[in-house]
Amino acid sequence: MKMTILSLFLALALTGTARAQIPTIDIQSIIQTGELIVNTAEQLDQMRRQIELQIRRYDLQQQQYEASTGNYNMGDLLNSEAYREARRFIPRSWQETLELLEGAQAANHQRQSQEAARSAREAGQRYSTSDLYEDDALDKAVRYGREARSVFTQIGVGQSNFDQSAVRTENIEFLIDQIDSAPDLKAATDLQNRLSAENAQLLGELIQLQSAGQINAGEIRLNNMNRRAEDVRMSRTNIPLLSATPNN
Protein backbone atom coordinates (compact mmCIF):
# COMPACT_ATOMS: atom_id res chain seq x y z
CA MET A 1 0.00 0.00 0.00
CA LYS A 2 2.82 2.34 0.92
CA MET A 3 4.61 1.77 -2.43
CA THR A 4 1.37 2.23 -4.38
CA ILE A 5 0.64 5.59 -2.79
CA LEU A 6 4.25 6.70 -3.25
CA SER A 7 4.33 5.63 -6.91
CA LEU A 8 1.09 7.46 -7.60
CA PHE A 9 2.42 10.57 -5.92
CA LEU A 10 5.63 10.50 -8.02
CA ALA A 11 3.68 10.02 -11.24
CA LEU A 12 1.50 13.01 -10.50
CA ALA A 13 4.48 15.09 -9.55
CA LEU A 14 6.42 14.24 -12.73
CA THR A 15 3.37 14.91 -14.87
CA GLY A 16 2.87 18.32 -13.30
CA THR A 17 6.55 19.07 -13.69
CA ALA A 18 6.56 18.15 -17.38
CA ARG A 19 3.65 20.45 -18.08
CA ALA A 20 5.23 23.36 -16.26
CA GLN A 21 8.52 22.68 -18.14
CA ILE A 22 10.63 23.16 -15.01
CA PRO A 23 14.19 22.16 -15.89
CA THR A 24 15.13 20.87 -12.40
CA ILE A 25 13.27 18.37 -10.22
CA ASP A 26 14.03 17.72 -6.55
CA ILE A 27 13.25 14.02 -6.60
CA GLN A 28 14.51 13.48 -3.04
CA SER A 29 12.19 16.16 -1.68
CA ILE A 30 9.29 14.69 -3.57
CA ILE A 31 10.05 11.23 -2.21
CA GLN A 32 10.34 12.53 1.35
CA THR A 33 7.09 14.40 1.00
CA GLY A 34 5.42 11.31 -0.38
CA GLU A 35 6.79 9.16 2.43
CA LEU A 36 5.55 11.70 4.97
CA ILE A 37 2.09 11.63 3.43
CA VAL A 38 2.10 7.83 3.36
CA ASN A 39 3.31 7.60 6.97
CA THR A 40 0.67 10.09 8.02
CA ALA A 41 -2.00 8.06 6.26
CA GLU A 42 -0.77 4.90 7.97
CA GLN A 43 -0.77 6.61 11.34
CA LEU A 44 -4.29 7.84 10.77
CA ASP A 45 -5.35 4.35 9.75
CA GLN A 46 -3.71 2.91 12.87
CA MET A 47 -5.43 5.51 15.02
CA ARG A 48 -8.74 4.59 13.40
CA ARG A 49 -8.20 0.91 14.22
CA GLN A 50 -7.26 1.78 17.80
CA ILE A 51 -10.39 3.90 18.19
CA GLU A 52 -12.52 1.09 16.80
CA LEU A 53 -10.86 -1.34 19.22
CA GLN A 54 -11.54 1.03 22.11
CA ILE A 55 -15.17 1.32 21.03
CA ARG A 56 -15.51 -2.47 20.96
CA ARG A 57 -13.90 -2.72 24.40
CA TYR A 58 -16.24 -0.07 25.71
CA ASP A 59 -19.25 -1.88 24.26
CA LEU A 60 -18.06 -5.12 25.87
CA GLN A 61 -17.55 -3.41 29.22
CA GLN A 62 -20.98 -1.86 28.93
CA GLN A 63 -22.50 -5.26 28.26
CA GLN A 64 -20.63 -6.76 31.21
CA TYR A 65 -21.77 -3.93 33.44
CA GLU A 66 -25.37 -4.32 32.37
CA ALA A 67 -25.06 -8.08 32.92
CA SER A 68 -23.88 -7.50 36.49
CA THR A 69 -26.49 -4.91 37.48
CA GLY A 70 -30.22 -4.69 37.54
CA ASN A 71 -32.90 -6.34 39.61
CA TYR A 72 -34.40 -9.62 38.44
CA ASN A 73 -36.46 -10.12 41.63
CA MET A 74 -34.86 -13.50 42.26
CA GLY A 75 -35.27 -12.88 45.97
CA ASP A 76 -39.04 -12.95 45.51
CA LEU A 77 -39.06 -16.46 44.06
CA LEU A 78 -41.05 -18.67 46.45
CA ASN A 79 -40.57 -15.99 49.08
CA SER A 80 -43.94 -14.31 49.35
CA GLU A 81 -45.50 -13.64 52.73
CA ALA A 82 -47.44 -16.91 52.47
CA TYR A 83 -44.22 -18.86 51.90
CA ARG A 84 -42.52 -17.06 54.78
CA GLU A 85 -45.38 -17.82 57.11
CA ALA A 86 -45.36 -21.49 56.13
CA ARG A 87 -41.67 -21.71 57.03
CA ARG A 88 -42.33 -20.50 60.59
CA PHE A 89 -44.13 -23.63 61.74
CA ILE A 90 -41.57 -24.10 64.55
CA PRO A 91 -42.25 -21.93 67.63
CA ARG A 92 -39.61 -19.37 68.52
CA SER A 93 -38.89 -20.82 71.96
CA TRP A 94 -39.36 -24.06 73.84
CA GLN A 95 -41.86 -22.41 76.17
CA GLU A 96 -43.97 -21.47 73.16
CA THR A 97 -43.65 -25.08 72.01
CA LEU A 98 -45.13 -26.32 75.28
CA GLU A 99 -47.90 -23.75 75.13
CA LEU A 100 -48.71 -24.73 71.56
CA LEU A 101 -50.65 -27.80 72.64
CA GLU A 102 -52.76 -25.95 75.18
CA GLY A 103 -53.36 -22.79 73.14
CA ALA A 104 -56.92 -22.25 72.05
CA GLN A 105 -55.86 -21.01 68.62
CA ALA A 106 -52.29 -20.93 67.40
CA ALA A 107 -50.92 -18.52 64.83
CA ASN A 108 -51.54 -19.50 61.23
CA HIS A 109 -47.97 -20.65 60.68
CA GLN A 110 -48.10 -22.86 63.82
CA ARG A 111 -51.60 -24.21 63.37
CA GLN A 112 -50.37 -27.24 61.46
CA SER A 113 -48.03 -28.20 64.32
CA GLN A 114 -50.78 -27.60 66.86
CA GLU A 115 -53.26 -29.82 65.04
CA ALA A 116 -50.65 -32.56 64.60
CA ALA A 117 -49.78 -32.40 68.31
CA ARG A 118 -53.43 -32.65 69.35
CA SER A 119 -53.98 -35.58 67.01
CA ALA A 120 -50.95 -37.32 68.51
CA ARG A 121 -52.29 -36.76 72.03
CA GLU A 122 -55.76 -38.04 71.13
CA ALA A 123 -54.25 -41.16 69.56
CA GLY A 124 -51.53 -41.85 72.10
CA GLN A 125 -52.45 -40.56 75.55
CA ARG A 126 -54.27 -43.21 77.57
CA TYR A 127 -54.74 -41.23 80.75
CA SER A 128 -55.04 -37.55 81.44
CA THR A 129 -53.64 -35.93 84.55
CA SER A 130 -57.06 -35.92 86.21
CA ASP A 131 -57.41 -39.65 85.53
CA LEU A 132 -54.27 -40.36 87.56
CA TYR A 133 -54.24 -37.73 90.25
CA GLU A 134 -56.99 -36.37 92.43
CA ASP A 135 -55.12 -33.08 92.79
CA ASP A 136 -53.70 -31.55 89.61
CA ALA A 137 -51.48 -29.31 91.72
CA LEU A 138 -49.41 -32.18 93.07
CA ASP A 139 -45.80 -32.20 91.92
CA LYS A 140 -46.26 -35.57 90.29
CA ALA A 141 -49.35 -34.38 88.46
CA VAL A 142 -47.62 -31.22 87.23
CA ARG A 143 -44.60 -33.18 86.01
CA TYR A 144 -46.79 -35.75 84.29
CA GLY A 145 -48.76 -33.05 82.50
CA ARG A 146 -45.61 -31.23 81.42
CA GLU A 147 -43.99 -34.41 80.16
CA ALA A 148 -47.11 -35.32 78.20
CA ARG A 149 -47.26 -31.88 76.58
CA SER A 150 -43.58 -32.07 75.76
CA VAL A 151 -43.86 -35.45 74.09
CA PHE A 152 -46.96 -34.77 72.03
CA THR A 153 -45.87 -31.27 71.00
CA GLN A 154 -42.53 -32.67 69.83
CA ILE A 155 -44.43 -35.25 67.77
CA GLY A 156 -46.58 -32.49 66.25
CA VAL A 157 -43.61 -30.31 65.32
CA GLY A 158 -41.82 -33.32 63.83
CA GLN A 159 -44.89 -34.26 61.81
CA SER A 160 -45.18 -30.71 60.50
CA ASN A 161 -41.54 -30.73 59.49
CA PHE A 162 -42.02 -34.03 57.68
CA ASP A 163 -44.96 -32.58 55.77
CA GLN A 164 -43.07 -29.40 54.97
CA SER A 165 -39.97 -31.24 53.76
CA ALA A 166 -41.72 -32.46 50.61
CA VAL A 167 -42.85 -28.91 49.82
CA ARG A 168 -39.37 -27.51 50.43
CA THR A 169 -37.87 -30.14 48.13
CA GLU A 170 -40.26 -29.07 45.37
CA ASN A 171 -39.28 -25.43 45.98
CA ILE A 172 -35.59 -26.20 45.61
CA GLU A 173 -36.24 -28.16 42.43
CA PHE A 174 -38.16 -25.18 41.05
CA LEU A 175 -35.25 -22.83 41.81
CA ILE A 176 -32.81 -25.24 40.17
CA ASP A 177 -34.96 -25.31 37.05
CA GLN A 178 -34.58 -21.52 36.78
CA ILE A 179 -30.78 -21.75 36.37
CA ASP A 180 -30.84 -22.48 32.64
CA SER A 181 -33.24 -19.61 32.00
CA ALA A 182 -31.09 -16.97 33.73
CA PRO A 183 -30.53 -14.26 31.07
CA ASP A 184 -27.12 -13.05 32.28
CA LEU A 185 -24.50 -13.19 35.01
CA LYS A 186 -26.40 -10.97 37.42
CA ALA A 187 -29.53 -13.10 37.18
CA ALA A 188 -27.51 -16.29 37.66
CA THR A 189 -25.73 -14.79 40.68
CA ASP A 190 -29.01 -13.65 42.22
CA LEU A 191 -30.48 -17.10 41.68
CA GLN A 192 -27.47 -18.72 43.31
CA ASN A 193 -27.89 -16.41 46.30
CA ARG A 194 -31.56 -17.35 46.51
CA LEU A 195 -30.66 -21.04 46.56
CA SER A 196 -28.06 -20.40 49.27
CA ALA A 197 -30.67 -18.57 51.34
CA GLU A 198 -33.10 -21.48 50.95
CA ASN A 199 -30.42 -23.92 52.12
CA ALA A 200 -29.60 -21.67 55.07
CA GLN A 201 -33.26 -21.63 56.08
CA LEU A 202 -33.42 -25.42 55.87
CA LEU A 203 -30.32 -25.65 58.05
CA GLY A 204 -31.89 -23.29 60.57
CA GLU A 205 -35.02 -25.46 60.74
CA LEU A 206 -32.89 -28.56 61.24
CA ILE A 207 -31.04 -26.92 64.12
CA GLN A 208 -34.34 -25.89 65.72
CA LEU A 209 -35.75 -29.40 65.42
CA GLN A 210 -32.61 -30.98 66.85
CA SER A 211 -32.61 -28.50 69.71
CA ALA A 212 -36.28 -29.17 70.44
CA GLY A 213 -35.60 -32.90 70.43
CA GLN A 214 -32.67 -32.49 72.81
CA ILE A 215 -34.71 -30.32 75.19
CA ASN A 216 -37.56 -32.80 75.08
CA ALA A 217 -35.24 -35.69 75.84
CA GLY A 218 -33.65 -33.67 78.64
CA GLU A 219 -37.00 -32.93 80.24
CA ILE A 220 -37.97 -36.59 80.13
CA ARG A 221 -34.69 -37.54 81.81
CA LEU A 222 -35.27 -34.83 84.41
CA ASN A 223 -38.73 -36.16 85.17
CA ASN A 224 -37.38 -39.68 85.49
CA MET A 225 -34.63 -38.45 87.80
CA ASN A 226 -37.14 -36.63 90.01
CA ARG A 227 -39.35 -39.69 90.07
CA ARG A 228 -36.48 -41.90 91.20
CA ALA A 229 -35.48 -39.29 93.77
CA GLU A 230 -38.98 -39.32 95.21
CA ASP A 231 -38.94 -43.10 95.39
CA VAL A 232 -35.63 -43.00 97.25
CA ARG A 233 -36.89 -40.31 99.62
CA MET A 234 -40.06 -42.22 100.34
CA SER A 235 -38.14 -45.43 100.98
CA ARG A 236 -35.93 -43.67 103.53
CA THR A 237 -38.77 -41.97 105.39
CA ASN A 238 -39.08 -43.30 108.88
CA ILE A 239 -42.61 -44.50 109.45
CA PRO A 240 -43.41 -44.27 113.15
CA LEU A 241 -44.56 -47.48 114.77
CA LEU A 242 -47.93 -47.56 116.47
CA SER A 243 -47.40 -47.47 120.19
CA ALA A 244 -48.80 -50.40 122.15
CA THR A 245 -52.07 -49.73 123.83
CA PRO A 246 -51.59 -49.99 127.61
CA ASN A 247 -53.60 -52.56 129.36
CA ASN A 248 -56.10 -51.05 131.67
Image (cartoon, rainbow, N blue to C red):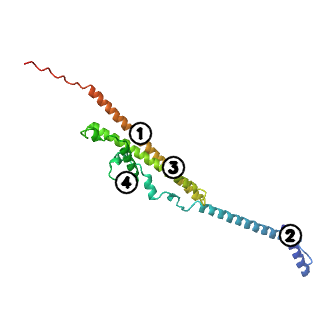
Whichever of labels 3 and 2 marks the residue nearer the N terminus, that label is: 2
Question: Mark 4 or mark 1, which has the lower sequence index?
Answer: 4
Q: Position of residue 64 (x, y in %)?
A: 62, 60
Identify the residue shown where x is 60% and y is 58%: 185
Earlier-in-chain disc, 4 versus 2? 2
- For the residue pair 202 and 86, the one nearer the viewer reads as 86
- Pointer 4: what residue? 107
For mark 3, does the 10 Å Cα neighbourhood hold few (<14), some (14 to 19), or many (20 or more) residues? some
Q: Residue furthest bottom?
A: 20
The residue depicted at 37 percent of the width and 35 percent of the height is: 221
Say what amino acid the circle numbered 4 marks: Ala
Marks 1 and 2: in contact by CB < 8 Å?
no
Q: The residue under label 1 is which amino acid type?
A: Gln
- Mark 1 or mark 3: whose residue is earlier in sequence: 3
Judged from the image, the secondary structure of the residue bearing numbered disc 3 is helix
Which marked residue is nearer to the observer: mark 4 or mark 1?
A: 4
Residue at label 1?
214
Q: CA distance from mark 1 to mark 3?
A: 23 Å
Residue 216 image point, x, y percent? 39, 40
Give SS at disc 4. loop
> In the displayed structure, would residue 168 be above or below residue 45?
above
Q: Quadrant of the N terminus?
A: bottom right
Q: Is residue 208 above or below residue 23?
A: above
